[in-house]
């Protein structure tokens, strides 16, 4: 970026305040268009009965304002509709899952693409098909296709995209200048930006010894962040129909091994113990002790609190196949038992449609699902030196959805347990695969087949 600093942060804050006022007007026009009588339905007076909707979301402190602003748009356009919000962070799914089981769930819920299928098969969310056929506010063709598909289960749309958060390389410009190193490319198709080029860069950025050591890279301790390396090498975690694990195949094992080698062979990435000594991944980045980190889009909202940290973003390097990254999604759903279906649907349109998308874009919490907003000035931010286009450009062929099944939570826990041991050098990649593959296979065989995708 160079330095975004307090000036740009202030501009963004002002834009957010103005955006809410503009979004209210946009929502009014949108909802007026969407509330026209359906074909064959007689026109009549608009319903003026007061309604209170309950809306749940999860957000860290720096992201609460965005969701509260989004929740305020519909009441600003239709004063008869009040929205009561609840931020169930942390342990969002545990709390929402309990409310669903008790029959007291919120009318409208934020839901991740990983968690939605397991609840959808239980009948938790409204079938949006009939409503989508009548709306002009959220046409499927105007959304990024990979994001739209994440919220369809067995051919039924159960949610709408709100945002997605792409994994990219965030680099500390101060460290690069100190080491005399040129920034990595902000392009997903640069043929020179390869795994070997990445290694060469991280080696040039790694310097010092002991308590003074600066590491060139940290890719996080979660197996989620090993996936881009596996994918770009032609590997995967599960087979195409989600009936068996394939992480024991050579192309997958090479991707996992690359991560392990960055830590133990090349020494450009800290061990978990060294990361603890550095005070954690993000504090080490702020302090210039980590030159680059792999993180998702929402990191931008965290960096707002550190205006003196000069940073920018770059693409993941190409493997044997291409440059690929993860793009976890956040969607919005309507509870299947809501007593206020029409009003809940209006709120859903507001959140996923243009009013909410513009607020999401200006906040940089994640790339909005609507393509025209993702590539608009709201997201690109004229005058900024941040490579903001890198994020939506990844959605045009350089992302892959996690292979979500209704057993994903159990699979996630199992994989993370064994990957942590592997990344710490306590077992080999083949040993990890030998432990997790039969257990994942058993999980998949114990569950009914569910198809996720449009």
Image (cartoon, rainbow, N blue to C red):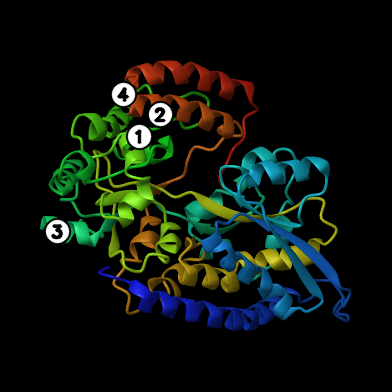
Q: Residue at x 39, y 62 (%)?
A: 303
Residue 280 x %, y %: 38, 45
Do tag 2 and tag 1 residues touch (Cβ < 8 Å)? yes
Question: Marks 1/3: CA distance?
Answer: 25 Å
Give the residue pinned by disc 3: 178
Give the residue pinned by disc 2: 420
Question: Marks 2/3: CA distance?
Answer: 32 Å
For mark 1, does the 10 Å Cα neighbourhood hold few (<14), some (14 to 19), or many (20 or more) residues?
A: some
Question: Marks 2/1: CA distance?
Answer: 9 Å
Question: Marks 3/4: CA distance?
Answer: 31 Å
Which numbered tag is attached to residue 425?
A: 4
Q: Residue at x 70, y 76 (%)?
A: 31
For mark 4, does the 10 Å Cα neighbourhood hold few (<14), some (14 to 19), or many (20 or more) residues?
A: some
Q: Residue at x 48, y 72 (%)?
A: 362
Q: Secondary structure at mark 1?
A: helix
- Please say whether residue 232 is visible from this viewpoint: yes
Q: Quadrant of the N terminus?
A: bottom left
């Amino acid at each position: 970026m160079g330095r975004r600093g307090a000036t740009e942060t202030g501009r963004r804050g002002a834009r957010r305040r103005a955006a809410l006022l503009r979004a209210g007007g946009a929502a009014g026009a949108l909802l007026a268009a969407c509330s026209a009588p359906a074909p064959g339905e007689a026109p009549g007076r608009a319903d003026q009965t007061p309604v209170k909707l309950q809306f749940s979301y999860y957000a860290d402190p720096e992201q609460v304002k965005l969701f509260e602003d989004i929740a305020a748009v519909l009441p600003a356009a239709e004063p008869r509709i009040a929205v009561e919000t609840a931020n169930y962070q942390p342990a969002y799914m545990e709390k929402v899952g309990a409310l669903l089981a008790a029959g007291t769930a919120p009318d409208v819920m934020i839901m991740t693409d990983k968690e939605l299928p397991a609840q959808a098969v239980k009948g938790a969310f409204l079938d949006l098909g009939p409503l989508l056929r009548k709306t002009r506010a959220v046409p499927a063709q105007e959304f990024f296709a990979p994001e739209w598909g994440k919220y369809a289960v067995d051919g039924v749309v159960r949610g709408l995209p709100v945002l997605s958060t792409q994994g990219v390389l965030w680099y500390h410009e101060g460290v690069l200048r100190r080491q005399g190193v040129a920034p990595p490319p902000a392009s997903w198709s640069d043929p020179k930006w390869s795994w070997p080029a990445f290694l060469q860069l991280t080696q040039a950025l790694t310097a010092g010894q002991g308590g003074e050591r600066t590491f060139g890279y940290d890719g996080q301790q979660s197996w989620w962040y090993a996936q881009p390396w596996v994918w770009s090498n032609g590997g995967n975690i599960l087979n195409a129909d989600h009936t068996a694990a394939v992480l024991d195949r050579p192309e997958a094992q090479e991707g996992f091994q690359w991560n392990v080698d960055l830590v133990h062979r090349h020494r450009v990435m800290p061990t978990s113990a060294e990361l603890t000594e550095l005070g954690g991944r993000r504090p080490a980045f702020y302090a210039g002790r980590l030159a680059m980190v792999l993180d998702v889009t929402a990191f931008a909202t965290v960096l707002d609190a550190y205006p003196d940290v000069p940073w920018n973003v770059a693409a993941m390097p190409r493997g044997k196949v291409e440059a690929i990254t993860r793009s976890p999604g956040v969607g919005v759903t309507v509870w299947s038992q809501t007593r206020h279906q029409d009003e809940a649907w209006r709120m859903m349109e507001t959140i996923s449609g243009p009013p909410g998308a513009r607020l999401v874009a200006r906040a940089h919490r994640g790339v909005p699902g609507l393509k025209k907003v993702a590539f608009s000035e709201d997201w690109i931010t004229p005058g900024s030196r941040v490579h903001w286009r890198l994020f939506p450009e990844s959605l045009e062929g350089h992302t892959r959805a996690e292979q979500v099944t209704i057993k994903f939570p159990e699979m996630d826990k199992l994989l993370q347990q064994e990957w942590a041991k592997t990344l710490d050098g306590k077992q080999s990649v083949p040993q990890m695969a030998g432990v997790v593959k039969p257990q994942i296979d058993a999980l998949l065989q114990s569950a009914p087949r569910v198809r996720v995708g449009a």
